[in-house]
Image (tube, helix red, strand yellow):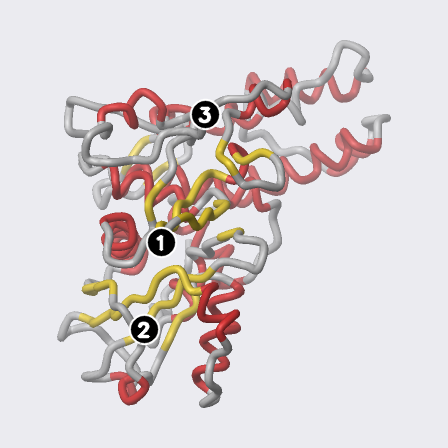
Amino acid sequence: MSGRHDFWLACGHHLLDKDEQGRLLATDEFLKAYLARPEIVPPDEACAAELALHQSLLSNPRQTVGPERVAAIIDADARENWSLMIAWRDHLAAYTSLESAYLAIVRLQLKFPRIFLDQLVQVILRSILDDCDDVFMLRAAELLFRSQKLTSHEGTLLASDEEAVSGANAIPLLPLNSLLGIAQAPVDVLSEENTDLYWERSDAFDMSLDLTAGRRGVAALGLVLTRWLRHLLGIDVKIDAVAELLDENFVWYVGLDADATRIGDALWSGDKLCEADRRLVVGLYRMTFAPDAEVIARVQGAPTHLILAMSADYTLRLKPQNLIIGLPIQHPTEALN
């Protein structure tokens, strides 16, 4: 860390260790943090089996938990929550690093609750951006693990955390005020003048990011994706925001979300985008690989395009896993663990 700021404290990064390559190691303390989740902490009226399991794991979070111990829990919802949590814990513990555990989920298409995946992405990003003092990059990184609602106004496109958006008018509100029905002014939009606010509010996710083409937010996301690929795949790339896709260079693309993939598929097939789809495009990027990158033959010397789009209801759900499985590179063949 820079020594001046900390951020995303709630993700639990301070509970983790690192190996010599900077990969994150799950400690007992990190695993215990899952036992504090509200879905897992047994209520006072919980059955004896659930109370005993919770207490036992607090003492030894890595102990083997047979299916009979979960089956003994009386409440059906609690049994389901515990089954999911134990499966997640077992997966994290099976790999030498959190990065390896994440790559296994992506490449093997393992099914886990989205909230677990988002939290894993966040803590990996927290490590990747440990030395970053650019709050525009930090705010842009939130797009990789938190859904956004976009608002278009007078030529400006603003991204606000979906949980901080209330009502059909898509005005960013603080969650508590929204819950209580208290009116308030929109949350702050991150700018050069208020960057210091981010550090004290990073865990609130209540600052909007300007994603208007040609402005700093779009470029910042490209820088984050560059670090993401270098850390997880060990490849060096250059990612530049562009105003439009050039058909003659459109040899490979990656859709960074479901809508972007659909739009990319249409372009790949030679279709012309309708005006409605054009309005959904949030960002376009041109990626070039370092000379030593092992890319497939058809892409050598040509750029790879990245597409970012929102849905028809102005929701943006970026999928960082798309970059892992969608690039035209030769993936390592060694074991994932």
CA distance separating discs 2 and 1: 24 Å
Q: Furthest-front residue in view?
A: 154
Residue at 82% of width from left, 17% of height from top?
47
Q: Is residue 298 toward the left or the right of residue 67 in the image? A: left
CA distance separating discs 3 and 2: 38 Å
Q: Amino acid at mark 3?
A: Ala
User: Earlier along the polypeptide chain: callout 2 or callout 1?
Assistant: 1
Residue 283's disc number: none
Q: Position of residue 197 (x, y in %)?
A: 28, 24
Q: Residues within 10 Å of mark 1 (few under 14, many from 20)?
A: few
Please count the marks in the image.
Answer: 3
Q: Secondary structure at mark 1?
A: loop
Q: Position of residue 213 (x, y in %)?
A: 29, 58
As drawn, 206 above or below 59: below
Residue at 19% of width from left, 63% of height from top?
236
User: Earlier along the polypeptide chain: callout 3 or callout 1?
Assistant: 1
Pointers 3 and 2 in contact (C-beta within 8 Å):
no
Q: Amino acid at mark 1?
A: Gly
User: Earlier along the polypeptide chain: callout 3 or callout 2?
Assistant: 3
Which residue position holds label 2? Answer: 305
Q: Furthest-right residue in view?
A: 74
Is 173 or 75 nearer to us in this picture?
Answer: 173
Q: Residues within 10 Å of mark 3 (few under 14, many from 20)?
A: few
Q: Amino acid at mark 2?
A: His
Q: Position of residue 4 (x, y in %)?
A: 16, 22
Residue 185's disc number: 3
